[in-house]
Amino acid sequence: MQAATSQTFEQHFLTFARLFADSSLDLLNQKLTASLDVECFLEASSRSQRSMVGSARLAWPENADEVLGLQWLLVQKLAREPRGLLNFAHTYYTVGRNVTGELHSLTRQLLIPFARDYKDYVMAMERSKVEASLSSVASDIGSAPAHITYHINGNNARVKHQSIDNSVNSVTVSSTVMNCIQDLRDEIQRAPLSEEQRGAAVDVVDEVEAQIASGKPKRAILAALLASLPAMESITSIGNNLLGALKTTGVM
């Protein structure tokens, strides 16, 4: 919009306005504009205009959130009534008789600051939601039973004592299975892979290990994960050995 002419400005402005009205922002926008009236704002602003061109001033309130809410409403109003863009810019962002200059003035003094402040507002609201969620989780943890003990050492057989919430579980690891997983990691490190490919392969092995550690691994899921590893004979062979070890030890 900073480089647009009066003939092309409207198209860019409508795209700009549409982004801020995305449905994913509905709740934030409703909160931001609650109890605000853009028509009353414009009426109050129009009373500041005198006989001299350029004398009109927008009647912004003192509260920063109310200013941001009115700016949002104003952008959406002008998007619904794009023919009023030129008149609005000429009235409140006067640059002599240069129409394009007035649109650029509107962009620099209103639209760009609005976009920056709106982004900060959305990010602040999202941080508040995350902090509230973490606080809730911390509260739940603080009120959880205090006598749950888990002793987990890898994979395979699981011995369960008691069948109530305050339970103690012990999981025994198959050394054969763990050796296969370690062999996979070692082979991936030796393989002629790019850093991106190596990182992705390590992530897959981590997921394989997590599936096994869950105590209820699905053969189809493990087979699919292992099949997604680099198609190298050594890696494929180790993956087949791992599936065989899991079947032999009764994990699957």
Image (spheres, rainbow, N blue to C red):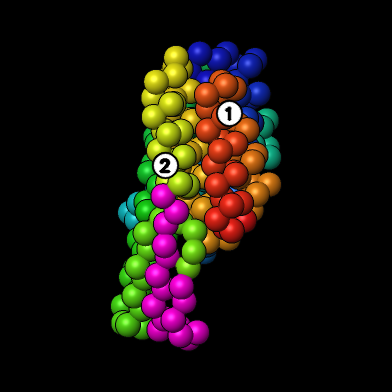
Residue 181's place in the image compared with 82, above or below, is below
Residues in magenta, as a range: 159-175
Image point 46% across, 73% down: which residue? 159
Image point 65% across, 15% down: which residue? 7
- Which residue, given by chain and number where applicable, does mark 1 sit on? 236
Q: Residues within 10 Å of mark 2 (few under 14, many from 20)?
A: few
Say which of marks 2 and 1 sits in front: 2
Looking at the figure, which quarter contains the C terminus? bottom right
Secondary structure state at the residue bearing disc 2: helix
The answer to if 173 sits in the magenta stretch is yes
Q: Amino acid at mark 1?
A: Thr
Q: Say which quarter of the image contains residue 6.
A: top right
Image point 63% across, 16% down: which residue? 8
- Which residue, given by chain and number where applicable, does mark 2 sit on? 179
Of 51 and 211, nearer the camera is 211
Secondary structure state at the residue bearing disc 1: helix
Q: CA distance from mark 2 to mark 1?
A: 15 Å
Of 61 and 208, nearer the camera is 208
Q: Say which quarter of the image contains residue 225.
A: top right
Which label is found at residue 65? none
Residue 167's place in the image compared with 133, above or below, is below
Residue 221 position within the rendered picture, expressed as x and y whole percent measured from the top left:
64, 46
Outermost residue on the front side: it is 248
Residue 18's place in the image compared with 95, above or below, is below
